[in-house]
Image: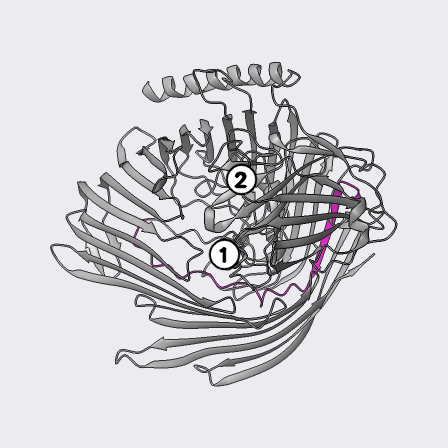
Amino acid sequence: MRALAFKSSLVFVLFALGAHSGATANAESAFVAKRVTVPRITTAPRIDGRLDDAVWEQAVKIRDVVQYSPGNGDPPSEPTEFLLLSDSENLYVGARFGDSMPEGIKRSQLVQGQGVTNDDYLQIVLDTYNNRRTGYMFYVNPNGVQRDGLLLGGMSYNMDWDGIWSGDAKVDADGWTAEVAIPFKTLAFDPRTDVWGINLIRSIRRKREEIAWSQRDRRITLDVDGEIAGMGGRDQGMGLDVVPSMNVTQRSDFAANRGRLTASPSFDAFYRITPSLGAAVTVNTDFSATDVDDRQVNLTRFSLFFPEKRDFFLEDTEVFEFGGLTQNGRPFFSRTIGLSSSGQPIDLDVGARVTGKIGRYTVGALAVRQGDAPGLLPQELFVGRAYASFGEQSTIGVIATAGDPAFGRTNSLVGADLLLRSQRTFDAAWWPRGVLEARAWAQRSSTGTAGGADGARGVSIAWPNDRIDALIGYTEIDQNFRPALGFVNRTGIAETVARSKFRHRYVERGLFRSWLYGFDVKQTTDRTGRLESRATILTPISLDTQPGDTFALDLARYTEVLHKPFVLPGPLTVPVGRYDYDRLRLYGSTAGFRKLALTWDLEDGDFYDGRRRDAKLGMTWKPHSRLLLGTSIQNSRIELPRSAFTARVYTLNANYAFGVKWAWLNVAQYDNVSRRLGLNSRLRWWPTMGQMAYLVVNYDWREDNYGNFRPFLAETTLKLNYTFRY
């Protein structure tokens, strides 16, 4: 009855918010967007970061900028100017950032495509449909390192999107300057739309000062973008990118005492069917240059989640997101494609994807033919997704999947989801402005056999804002729910979650910038209402200093009810029973821009009928912008009445940037459960966006019972690709 009442209350909120969303969709907001008209030019500037071409004198200049952090609408502490131009092929953005202490400009990142938020940077946000729903993000730091991504509805991001564009920057005695050229061929937009949304942002890292052309209440979301006019009638060309690749691989299997040299071409093509709808094809797909997974040791009762890192599946991944689900219960998780039931990689023969917009509808379809593997025939796999936009930022959609990549069995899934989202709710003096979200979703899987109890469903309502971040939700996952192309690691459950975090920002520029406190509660029962687990976590203190150092404390109370023994590495066994225990956690970090940056995560307390102590320590040392050395040590000591075990994971990173175009990236990892030592070394040449060459070395050693490491597998790959754009 309590679960029914809870769900009924949430459904009522969904309908109430839906009514509000529809009612306010056309209401006049107190926020009025800034607008400028972008001049068109016939002679393009040279993108070298110097901002000294005469054509920049024709640019519209933007100087009416304000702080959004730490000040809320205060003038910037340093002179800041943005410049805008365009021609038939590109949108050009220039930036002139004065600095009274140019030697203090942070510019430690030299590896192209890596994160730049620990440096000073220029950020450009483009909402090409001007619908306040999705946008492109482009970053440049003072070294000219480029980074891009997608800004999704709300405050979520996809930093795995890679577009073709150019940018550069230069530091001088007055500060630094930057130039960016964004080709219209890189963007999806409606040529009939004359006005785009845009925001222009500057970060001064040593001060942790964030400056924007347009902001509201410290929020930089699409609903507070400014606007640029004069963008209609732009030409995207044929909209065709052709990317041939070639890789040569030498593979040595030391256990079998054999080696093999292979050379295999691969082919990718991207075609813009309409200005807002694109298609992609990949043939003989190669993932040799993909980042390796972070090593994990499973000390829980449920399977671990490893994020997707393969480029083909990361592109347009936001289209296939469903119901706000991140892990358990996801209907589609691309990581399942190309992996057997034992976790071994399987080749992909061909794949095709169509994603984009048709009017108010966003659509996505992905079809893949997976190659054969021992005991597994080739598989055809499919996922389709569509949702319609309405109101301010609300959507209603469906999803369907077909195929079982791991076992080759008959499997399909259908689902529907609803998002009601308002940016203007409770815009009153007694309550902070912010976003209100409500979600509802349902899924059903089918394995071709009768059985039932094969669905999943959930509802939630959230207030995800800066001062108050709160959520309450309810989820049910049936015992036989099997999304073969998704991710599920706990079935036959009903889960209730509640979270509330409160942030206090200090107006005066003292030692601390903000203090966050709150709680998280998660309770899981079986479908009859019997308790399986409960976690109550209280965070009384989470401090953020002015430079960016953090310190936090958690107090946690756990309840676990085991209906069968729980086996841990060691091996350790926890018998059937109910366990109530408490734990204490201290964690934090020093500011990432420092030459020596530290992270720590220490946890101690009871663990079932024993004790567990966890310590994870990380260090990153950047003696100069070319070299980065990092290490991470993770120890988990578990002591039970019958036995004890220590799980260890060690990671070492060593990266060297010869310049913006050349980088040597290395990571070595070891854990004492698999007893494997792995090395991934990549020498990368990235002369410009769309062109790349890799030399990749992967080496795997196995530890024997005497502590000796013996080579097991070695693989060396040379990969080249080049983008032809039409």
Residue type at mark 1 is Gly
In the structure shown, which secondary structural element does the residue marked by tag 1 occupy? helix
Which one is nearer the viewer's eye here, 698 or 301? 698
Q: Which mark is residue 156?
A: 2
Locate residue 122 relative to residue 638 in the image: left or right.
right
Query: What's the CA distance linking mark 1 and mark 2?
Result: 31 Å
Which one is nearer the viewer's eye here, 267 or 45? 45
Binning the other alpha carbons within 10 Å of mark 2 as few (below 14), some (14 to 19) or many (20 upward) gives: few
* Viewer-nearest of discs 1 and 2: 1
Residue type at mark 2 is Ser
**The residue positioned farthest toward the left in the image shown:** 641
**The residue positioned farthest toward the right in the image shown:** 42
Q: Which mark is residue 328?
A: none
- The magenta stretch is 273-301
Q: Is residue 617 visible?
A: yes
Q: Quadrant of the C terminus?
A: bottom right
Where residue 596 appears, as percent x and y from the top left, is 38, 62
Quarter of the image for residue 350 reads: bottom right
Quarter of the image for residue 312 reads: bottom right
Question: How many numbered marks have been drawn onto this rendered protein structure?
Answer: 2
The stretch drawn in magenta includes residue 291: yes
In the picture of the structure, the residue carrying the numbered disc 1 is: 104
Which one is nearer the viewer's eye here, 257 or 648? 648
Q: First in sequence, mark 1 or 2: give its number.
A: 1
Q: Is residue 448 visible?
A: no
Binning the other alpha carbons within 10 Å of mark 1 as few (below 14), some (14 to 19) or many (20 upward) gives: some
State whether residue 562 is above or below residue 452. Answer: below
In the structure shown, which secondary structural element does the residue marked by tag 2 occupy? loop
Q: Residue at x 34, y 36 (%)?
A: 515
Which one is nearer the viewer's eye here, 180 or 255? 180
Q: Quadrant of the N terminus?
A: top left
